[in-house]
Amino acid sequence: MKAIRELIAECSTQAFDLHFTRAKEWKAEKEGRVVVGYMPIYFPREIIHAAGALPVGIFGGGDRKQVIKGDAYYQSYICRIPRSIMELVLDKHTAHFDGYIFPSICDVIRNLSGIFKQQKIGKFVKYMDFPQNFLPEIGGVYYQQEMAHVLKYIKDLNGVEVTTDALNHSIGLYNKNRELIELIYHIRQEFPWRLSIEDVYHVIRAGTVIPVEEHNDILKQVCAHIQQDIGKPQDKIKVVISGAFCEQPSIGLIRAIEEAGCYVVDDDYMLGSRMIMGPVDPDTDNPLEAIASAYIRQSQYSSSIYDVHDPKELRLAKIVKDRGADGVIFASASFCDPSLLDAPIFQNAFDRMGIRYMAFQFSENINQFKVIKEQVGAFSDSIKLWDEEPIVI
Ligand code: SF4
């Protein structure tokens, strides 16, 4: 087993390798291999894996890529992630990618898929509409058709006809992946000092750009380390981060929140890797139906899902309660409509429930966050010094 710092260093390198080197190596290992990029939030990576291809998450350039050309494709008053994705693509960072998938999340991502098509970037561009109807016979069937469409694109490139056995095998691998990630959160809920949220972020984000088999091996080792009594607790409150599910805060900002006095015991930074709660049926005659069923019945709440029958404010409140958190930090990317439109819904509900919260906005490239750090510190102090109210749900 590798030392924990060695594992984290490897994950950190992979997570922020904007040249996607591991995917390039993987592709070069065997002729005919296909690499498929996918945008946030969630995509069922199992089906790409089963088709013999490698799914690779594209989460923007963060504070490590200057955006110049990408700005020409978008107006100023939208978030930054689509511009930095354009910059990465125009600078050939993804030249080894064969196709791109744009899960439906907002108009910005929809328009980005249109730009990719217009500019003829990649061998295929798929805008994937996720169902907003949660009846298995309607939304579920539609979702299966969308997945079959993706598989057709990949088959046209590598000739692979996906089998039931291959899909079941891939489902099993990703079930294990989510199970191990949840184990990390479960351990940190009680012992957050054993692994910082910055380290957790590196570990999970690395899994979006390397083969799942390699990531599962890393996760097993990380879990083994943090099951031991390592580190020392500090006097910090526990918080849940919500709203940063697409454009990602810089790693410095992720670190600053914990440094300012808040153990982050749950978050939605890498929501796609944790979207399905619990296992997908790995032993079925119809794996696409199993994946669709899991999406319909077992999805985490998300600003991209219409959830009138299962309000997200109640679901976030339950996470706060289950994790034993003292409050919530709403972190939204600037101009992120889905996140910012949900914020008042959450905040009105939390005012009624007595759940403490604070909110700020960020851009992926900001690395001057002294003001945010001070606000987070004041939030932490106010709860530590004056809080006696229980959370009522
Ligand atoms: S950050 Fe928000 S607005 Fe921007 S692409 Fe992502 S979901 Fe859409």
Image: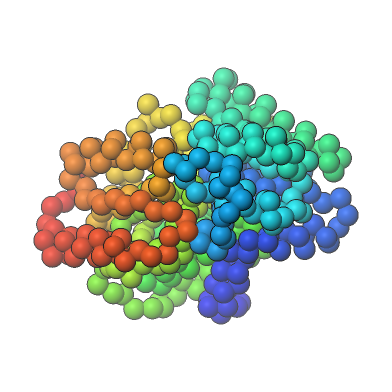
Please determine whether, in this image, residue 257 is positioned above or below residue 96.
below
Asked whether residue 220 is in view, the answer is: no
Q: Nearer the viewer, residue 28 or 71?
A: 71
Q: Is residue 96 left or right of residue 289?
A: right
Asked whether residue 24 is in view, the answer is: yes
Number of disc labels? 0
Query: In the rendered view of the protein, which quadrant contains the N terminus?
Result: bottom right
Task: Point out residue 35 in the picture as x, y percentages from the top left corner.
Answer: 74, 50
Q: Residue at x 56, y 55 (%)?
A: 67
Task: Point out residue 25 in the picture as x, y percentages from the top left corner.
Answer: 77, 63
Q: Nearer the viewer, residue 131 or 309?
A: 131
Q: Nearer the viewer, residue 69 or 379?
A: 69
Please determine whether, in this image, residue 351 is positioned above or below residue 389.
above
Task: Point out residue 323 in the picture as x, y percentages from the top left corner.
Answer: 33, 54
Task: Point out residue 22 in the picture as x, y percentages from the top left corner.
Answer: 71, 63
Please determine whether, in this image, residue 26 is positioned above or below residue 115.
below
Q: Nearer the viewer, residue 92 or 206?
A: 92
Q: Is residue 324 left or right of residue 60?
A: left
Please determine whether, in this image, residue 7 is positioned above or below residue 292.
below
Query: In the rendered view of the protein, which quadrant contains the C terminus?
Result: top left
Q: Residue at x 64, y 57 (%)?
A: 209
Q: Residue at x 48, y 68 (%)?
A: 199
Q: Is residue 150 left or right of residue 355?
A: right
| Corner quadrant of residue 347 | top left
Q: Is residue 258 left or right of residue 123?
A: left
Q: How is the image coloured?
A: rainbow
